[in-house]
Amino acid sequence: MSTPANPLPVLGTPARKPEEEIRPLKAPVDPATLTHRQLLGGEFWRRIPAYADVTEEQFLDHNWQSKHTIMKPEKLLEAVHGLVSPEFIADCRVGFERAPMSVRVSPYMLSLVDWEHPYEDPLRIQFIPVGSRLLPDHPKLGLDSLHELEDSPVAGLTHRYPDKALFLPLDTCPVYCRFCTRSYAIGIDTEQVEKVHFKAKTERWQAAFKYISSRVELEDIVVSGGDAYNLRASQVSEIGEALLAMPNIRRIRFATKGPAVMPQKILTDHAWTDAITGIVEKGRKLHKEVVIHTHFNHPKEITEITARAMNLLFERGITVRNQSVLQRGVNDTVDVMKLLVKRLGHVNVHPYYVYVHDLVRGVEDLRTTLDTALTLEKHVRGATAGFNTPTFVVDAPGGGGKRDAHSFETYDRENGISVYTSPAVKQGQFYLYYDPLQLLSPNAQERWSIPAMQKQMVEAAIERAHDQVRPFR
């Protein structure tokens, strides 16, 4: 019998060494290029004249941050006096007069703005309006574009998805974002909007709890607002305990912008952080999931202070997920979005969603096209692990819920109309999203200026969607 040309190795013997070393397929990475790990540190707030003498101990104190949070336009302009031109100040005054959201900016966030280039700064764009950049609203915009009020069985509770409800225990936040989809309710009344208010009242909460416990199909509750950051520690415990006590509830998400705009609270408001921790730990013992959902939109929002706060939550076993809003001039480029996603992962925050900007009044300068979202999603996927890669979604106007951005039935890029269906939420209905007019061709903008043409374009889009939809068997 002949001996095999390549005999199998005897078990237990070392494998034969290769004749030459395996060459790496990729060149070594220069550590300097890993910018997602390079977080802003030091006493950066001293660049603001109003905070030049503020110590680190003061700046890290959540009480100091809250006390010095700016809620009046004149106070904000006073804080940046000398950093910007008189023309910019005047531009801001016009922006405040025309904005649907009231002003609320933390010292931390104000300190991160590049005041040498305020018009281009992505943080200024999100929180401080300037009149010269405001654009006319799309004719299909509405104040409550997601129809949250229409899906509310009791005040401050939206029940849209079969097994999930949105609970709004209060109507205030640590900061007020220009792009807020709930500008119909959040903050004080403005010259442009008279708000619907959801005050933190036990009687209203009890009505919501009664409804939630009565609906056996409800398993998942989002506690938002407003913002869970503005709940007192005792209120966090009260809400968490009430929901965990319901046999039908399996998951609770506390939604807060806080970690992005005031991470100091997690570090120094020990009662609040302990309250969240207590509900998370009790939920775990009951085999129920309690997490935090937060809201970073730009890499500049993540600093060494952020990392310290997220490390504390991570040490306590608290899962934090992120939901960004896609905004023009903020995070609508591949490089910025990839850096944001990587930096979130670096501080143990899971990128969950990127929302295509809702059809919100007064912020048309922030919206961009659905096509932009599709391009970003294509380039972001594969840049890091799948569990740290966000899903790009459209929250379907009119109450269809969140749809994968690429799951449209039709998308007319020329006229900027995309049509979605939402079979699990509302069978047989169509939901239309509209790209901002200013990013359409001149011919398309002209068509949108004619009411009869608007109707014709919408009807044509729905007709095409009808042709695309096939029954699922």
Image (cartoon, rainbow, N blue to C red):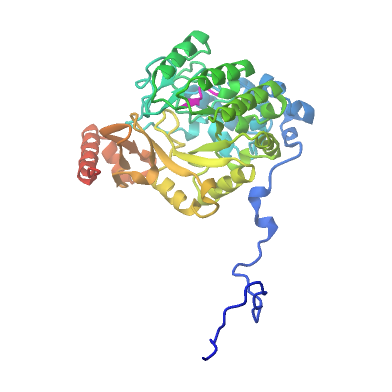
Asked if residue 231 can be seen in this view, the reply is no
In the displayed structure, does residue 17 sit left or right of residue 425?
A: right
326 on left or right of 267: left
Q: Which residue is at a point 50% across and 48% down the rendered structure image?
A: 333
In terms of image quadrants, where is residue 127? top right
**Is residue 226 within the magenta segment?**
yes
Q: Is residue 263 above or below residue 382?
A: above
Would residue 26 appear left or right of 140 to someone viewing this image?
right
Q: Would you place residue 138 above or below residue 93 in this image?
A: below
Q: Is 184 or 425 nearer to us in this picture? A: 425
Q: Residue at x 55, y 52 (%)?
A: 384
How many labels were placed on the picture? 0
Nearest to the observer: residue 100 or residue 226: 226
Q: Residue 61: where, in percent of width, then height?
A: 73, 25
Q: Residue furthest bottom?
A: 2
Residue 124 image point, x, y percent: 58, 34
Residue 41, image x, y percentages: 73, 40
Please name the residue shown 45% across and 31% down the image.
Answer: 363
Q: Which residues are magenta?
A: 221-227
Give yes or no for residue 199 being in the magenta stretch: no
